[in-house]
Image (tube, rainbow, N blue to C red):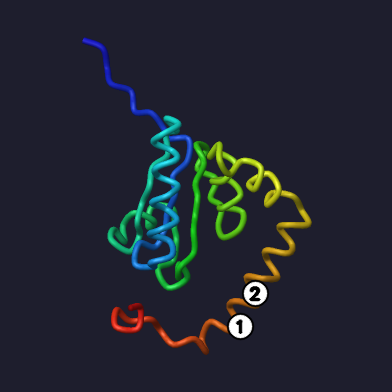
Amino acid sequence: MPRKTETVPLLTVFHDGSSRLWRTRIGIYKLEARRTGLDIAWRDYAADPDAADALGLDPAARGHRLYVADGDSTLYEGAAALAVLWSALPSHQRLGHLLATPAADKLARVCEKIAHIFAPSRAPRTEASAR
């Protein structure tokens, strides 16, 4: 009897499903991956906290960040993770390659630092304020 071999997905995307923005974006990316037959695993660490523990992601540091692990278990986060994911999706490949350039990476890091500076001053969204 032949053995079942476990295949490693092309990418494993870890996202925060409690974030409405990420739920929407990930839904779009899932449709694209399914339509093109890409083997991408989607893990929502808000719904399944153990999903990212195996990779050593600290729950306090996760925030609303995107993480992507490639087939070699190299972990990317933030803009680098988005560049890897977009590079795999046919409709986003050009943007992914552009975001992977050193200049775009530096700009993304600066924008991320600015966002973190202002993050504590933003009031948390509730279901009532989201309407």
Residue for badge 1:
117
For this orientation, the residue located farthest to the front is 131
Give the left or right position of residue 88, taking residue 98 as reference: left
- Looking at the rendering, in which quadrant would you find the N terminus? top left
- Looking at the rendering, in which quadrant would you find the C terminus? bottom left
In the image, residue 21 sits, relative to residue 89, either above or below, namely: below
Residue 66: percent from the left, percent from the top? 49, 59
For this orientation, the residue located farthest to the right is 103
* Amino acid under disc 2: Lys
Tell me which corner region of the image, top left, top right, bottom left or bottom right, holds residue 6: top left
Judge the density around disc 2: few (<14), some (14-19), many (≥20) Cα neighbours within 10 Å. Answer: few
| Count of all numbered marks drawn on residues in the image | 2
Give the Cα separation between the discs numbered 2 and 1: 6 Å
* Amino acid under disc 1: Ile
Tell me the element at label 2.
helix
Between 36 and 51, which is closer to the camera in this rendering? 36
Residue 3: percent from the left, percent from the top? 27, 17
Contact, mark 2 vs mark 1 (Cβ under 8 Å): yes
Residue 28: percent from the left, percent from the top? 43, 49
What is the number of the mark on residue 113?
2
Residue found at x 45% / y 70%: 63
